[in-house]
Image (cartoon, grey):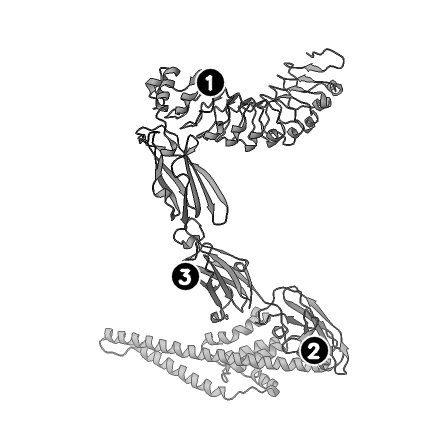
Amino acid sequence: MVHHHHSRPNSLYLSNNELAELPRQMQSFNTLAHLDISFNSLTELPYVHHSTDQLQTLDARSNSIVGLPGELAACINLKKLLLFKNMLSDLPEDLFQSLPHLRILDVSSNVLTSVPTSIFNFCTELRELRLADNRIDSLPKDIANLEKVTRLILGNNRIQSIPVEMNNLTSLVELDLSGNLLNHIPDQAFLHLNHLKVLSLANNQLQSLPNFGSLADLEVLDIRKNPLTVLHVSIAKLLALEDLRLDTHKHSTITIPPLAVCQRGKAVIMSYLTDLLKGVPEPAACEAYGPGLEPSGVVASEHTFTIQSFDKYGNPKTVGGDVFIVQISVTKSDATSQQWEAVPKDLGDGTYTVTYDARESGTYTIKVSNQNENISRSPFRRSLAPGMVSAFHCTCEGEDLVRGQAGRVGTFLIKARDEYRNLLGTTALRFQVIMSLSEGIGSTVNVDRLKWSVTDNGDGTYTGSYSTPISGTYKLDVTLDGRSVCGSPFHVDVEPGETVASGCTASLTGLGNVEVGVVSSFVVMARDRFGNGRTKGGDLFATLLIGPDGGNVESEVIDNGNGEYFVRYTPHQAGPHRVEVKLITSKGTGRSIAGAPFLVKVEDAKDAILHRQHMENVKLANDLAQLNKKFAEAQAKLAQNEEELKAREDEIEERAVKESGGTTSPVRRTSGHMLGSRESSQRSLDRDLQLYTYDPQNESTVINGLLGLKPHVQPVPFHILGLCILELMREGRGEDVKGLVWNCVAGVRKILFSEVCLIMLPFVHASRDIYND
């Protein structure tokens, strides 16, 4: 039901109407000062901003709103914003910059994980801030700006600590921090809260309490459900305290005052603490001593010292319960600083042990105080040096550990560190750099040409260097006393140096004999001064071709992008041509590459054909030489086989003699006769080899003679057989090859068939016709 008083109302109450959205008529309600839409089913807030600067109160409690519209920032005079029990996961940072008059903000019972700092920086007129029942885990230091806030409700969140700056909230009357994860509260946090009346610290993880001595107006103090062992004696100074809530059941962890005292009520507790207060330590008389306070030392994970408590008469206390604050700060070698607190352990006899972590080298300041006053000789100052060097924690820095250049000295910085990564000082150490080839570079690199060294800079750092004339991937191992430092070995890609003309080469193809009118080409390979092939393009090469008549021949240079350059040209007349290839330097001058200028012989078509035939004959002769070599290898293998066979037959004969009682075995005689025949065939073959010689002018005579042989006439030397087969195949006379093979094989039946196969195998592979036959 809608309730309003005029046609253009300044108040509108729509609560408890099960609304899922607001009526469209609200778009015309631009004079609203108070709007109540609580206890509905709204998920968003449309039309609210139409009231602009008139709206002062917006009550949207108990809905399902998931986000606030940015247009809400137009309501600049908003004083009360109630969003209790919705589904807000965040609040717009810029929204609260436009709400400087906001006095009450309630966003309890949502799913917030943080609070916008704009609330603390721009909403300085806030009187009441409710953030309970969310998931907030920290409070910013900017909370100190809320000097006028009287109620701060932060219960049931995940807050682990509160900033010291909270002591600036001097108007605070009620502070609820219950149901969080607090394990320590700095004494200074409550130092100036002189008007605080209600303080709830229940249901946290507090093992000790801060000094409450300045809370003169405190009426209610709730410290239940904390693992407390000692009640701070400053509670005795809370003269206005009416309600002290603490655990008094049998499972209570409080030992001072004793449980029996706590169970008797506030008055008895206050009396007990007052008696203890008379024995409160005198800070100026208290002392601290131990190795953890010595002026100099070495970094370590644990440093310890002891605090002895004294009363105002100078007597050492024999009971615990005192609260000492230990603040530690360090200024590091890089001029940065860090500070933290250490919690003393109460030994119950008037002494307290303090353990703190000091792994970073630098100057430490240790301040020990009680009741906001330093104890004797506090603050303590000490200088901690790095520990022993640790090879594993030493580091190397520099781009040359990743990429270098052939011929250039690569450098990098080695930093000597201890096990906590502190940089060591001037200690002289034996770092070593070893450079070796990675797999894949090749065995042609002379390792003696690799250079490396280490120089001590005298400040805990060392300069490592290396150089190599060969490009490729290298392994760089940096060690200290034989142990590799952090990240070692490093894999360094050494790139080729700058291209130099004297290192560049050109391929022979295209620079030999070429033919008139035929496109010819050759490749220029860019190299550095060490002969490393460049892997990238971008160089500028110029070519000049001069024909036999002195005229220029047009040419084209194509950059392949991989350090190779394709040069193409077409000669138009026979005769010698002069080819000049130059590398154009950055200064615009040209320098000839290695071997340039080149002399190219250009032939007409007829000469070119004769030249090719000649080259084919040369190749044929080379093939014959290879064939002779294989024949010699076959002969050696045959001799080896015969020796093995003879040894085998001797073994068989001996065994037969033993078995027959001395009678010669017929197997031996038969084998001997066979061997004699084999040796006779070999001598005949050796004689026949002298009957044939290779004469290019007499090829047809030899071939025709072999084709006319009759079977069983005479054996044919294998190398002559192979030569003839090559020639017949070149002429395409496949049928003659078949006849030749039959005649020759039939004429050498006394030669092992395996030897014939050895000679014939290359030709069978070369001619598919013979293979199929």
Instruction: Judge whether 605 appears above or below 562 on screen.
Output: below
- How far separated are the C-alphas under marks 1 and 2? 105 Å
Please tell me how crowded label 1 is: few (under 14), some (14-19), or many (20+) other residues with Cα within 10 Å: some
One can see residue 253 in this view: no
> Is 356 placed left or right of 662 in the picture?
right
Q: Nearer the viewer, mark 1 or mark 2?
A: 1
Residue 294 percent coordinates (x, y): 36, 45
Q: Secondary structure at mark 3?
A: loop
Q: Nearer the viewer, residue 272 or 181?
A: 272
- Farthest left residue in view: 661
Per the image, the residue denoted by label 3 is 430
Q: Say few, some or many: other residues with alpha carbon within 10 Å of mark 2 (under 14 / 14 to 19 / 20 or more).
A: some
Is residue 422 depicted above or below 370 in this figure? below
Quadrant of res 253: top left
- In the image, what residue type sits under mark 3? Arg
- Alpha carbon of mark 3 to alpha carbon of mark 1: how far? 68 Å
The disc at residue 220 is: 1
Which residue in the protein does label 2 denote? 579
Q: Earlier in the sequence, mark 3 or mark 2?
A: 3
Observer-side mark, 3 or 1, equals 1
